[in-house]
Image (cartoon, rainbow, N blue to C red):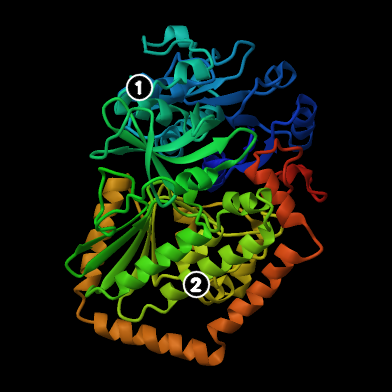
Amino acid sequence: MRILLLTHAFNSLTQRLAAELQQCGHQTSIEFDIADSVTEEAVALFAPDLIVAPYLRRAIAESIWSRIVCLIVHPGVVGDRGPSALDWAIQNQETEWGVTVLQAQAEMDAGPVWASASFPMRQTRKSSLYRQEVTLAASRAVLEAVQRFESGSFVPHAPATLPATRGQWRPLMKQAQRQLDWQRDSSATVLSKLCAADGFPGVADHLFGQPCHLFDAWPEATLRGTPGAVIARRETALLRATADGAIWIGHVKRANGIKLPAALAFAGDAQALPEQPLPDWWRSSTATWQDIAYEEAGPLGFLSFEFYNGAMSTTQCDRLRSALRWAKQRPTRVLLLMGGSDFWSNGIHLNVIEAASLDGGSAADESWRNINAINDLALELINTEQQITVAALGGNAGAGGCFLARACDLVWAREAVLLNPHYKNMGNLYGSEYWTYLLPRRIGSDAAQAIMRDRQPMTARRALQAGFTDACLAGELPVFRFEVAQRAAALATQSELAQRLATKRESRQRDEAVKPLAAYREEELTQMRRNFYGFDPSYHIARHHFVHKSPASWTPRHLARHRDLGWRLP
């Protein structure tokens, strides 16, 4: 079938559904929901058999849903209605939730139900729940709904005729329902409210007497202070006392500003706070905020880095490189880079780069520092001689993060993971991280250029088929990590491991003799220098719109196939 995906943005859920539907043999095209007239034009051009709307912020026009079946993906159980479904579910501490695929009608979220899927609620942030449980449940439900539609025999059910559920109408959650009382609220209450607002819109509050929105909260088990007071800092995070404990705040958005690491957004005030470094940074702890951690199990070393949204600033790259160099000196045989729970890495930190220009500095200079810092990190990985390195992708990866992973000897990805191994969407950015060395030697020059040109997301299964990764492992994150450890243990005890390491060193020496890594880096950075400092401002414009979340004014042509000049109906 021809299926048009109508969406507010090309977010992780839309990417997953597009990839899954294509793997099922359907033709898909994407249109951003900009205006009814634009959507009507897309429908006329693509002539879809079906419209699927994974992520909308307004209703579909009657002129469209009255003519073509439009399936809305609602992140709530059957009968749930309203624009803040996940927010209420998290804040009300629901133990089970779901996704409903229903048909668009005049009344919002009240149309006939085509499919649904449920999942146990995990105590986590809304953004994490959306990327993992909601996305996987939505994939199951949408594929089921599409099969039912394609059969032509299924009759969708009105919500009122289905078995009773917890679903009900809930209004837009406003800041009044999210309001924090630091003097009276427990840490659990504060954390619940912050988790329910993470990603968007955050919780409106004040820090150091200045209005801001709070994001990225983590519990603290031992440190205490006067309720409401900001009592400490650690790297990029700030610690604020609650009625019975304290909560780490990782990111904030100041009034009329952009989302930034909290200690950077309030840099002057943060410097006056006492630093609370971890006594043993490498010991992984769930009792406090920690962005880089290391664990060891016999011949295995596990290096984790939980960077918000997968973005890696210059400082974070430098710190991770120092941790990597330390880990390489340990007496292990296999070194696994675990990334974070939602993201492995998305490359350079665009928000921190943008902040440099807002503070009277140079975004170009900070871009240059950041790309060189992540290149240094990639080089450290490539030149690991005493261990087999494994990138264990339990979370998504994009842009430079994909090629940082490919700098490892092996890449094992969880089946639910999405990869975006390309750069051009960010203002025709050329990219670095030694991709011109790492990718062609892996899959060939033609295939490498196709990936960079097409700019499409890849499921873990597709990445394995394309040769970009080495394994695709099923299961939820804990299961994935267990299997990764088992595979790594088997690898570490192989009798031919020493020979494998020797072959790895010899291969690197041969490659270096043919063309040094420094030459690849210089060629890439010559292109990046043009992106950062050249006459074409496309990168800076694209970064600005991305960071400031500017509403889309058109759908990128590599997504809207129906708008290609050569598009013809079959």
Using the rendered view, name the quadrant where residue 452 is placed: bottom right
**Front tag of 1 and 2:** 1
Answer with left or right where residue 396 lies relative to residue 72: left
Q: Which mark is residue 506?
A: none
Q: Residue at x 23, y 67 (%)?
A: 300
Q: Amino acid at mark 2?
A: Asp
Please state the horizontal and vertical placement of residue 151, each as a whole percent of the image: 53, 29
Q: Which mark is residue 183?
A: 1
Q: Going by the picture, which residue comes out furthest to the top? A: 160
Residue holding disc 2:
376
The residue sitting at 46% across, 69% down in the picture is 377
Hey, which quadrant is residue 87 in on the image?
top left
The CA distance from mark 1 to mark 2 is 45 Å
At which x and y percent is residue 374?
51, 66
Task: Tell me where residue 563 appears, x and y as whole percent.
Answer: 78, 44
Is 167 placed above or below 325 here? above
Residue 486 image point, x, y percent: 22, 60
The amino acid beneath tag 1 is: Gln
84 on left or right of 1: left
Please determine whether, in this image, residue 192 is positioned above or below residue 12.
above
Image marks 1 and 2: residues in contact by CB distance under 8 Å: no
Would you say 213 lies left or right of 273 here?
A: right
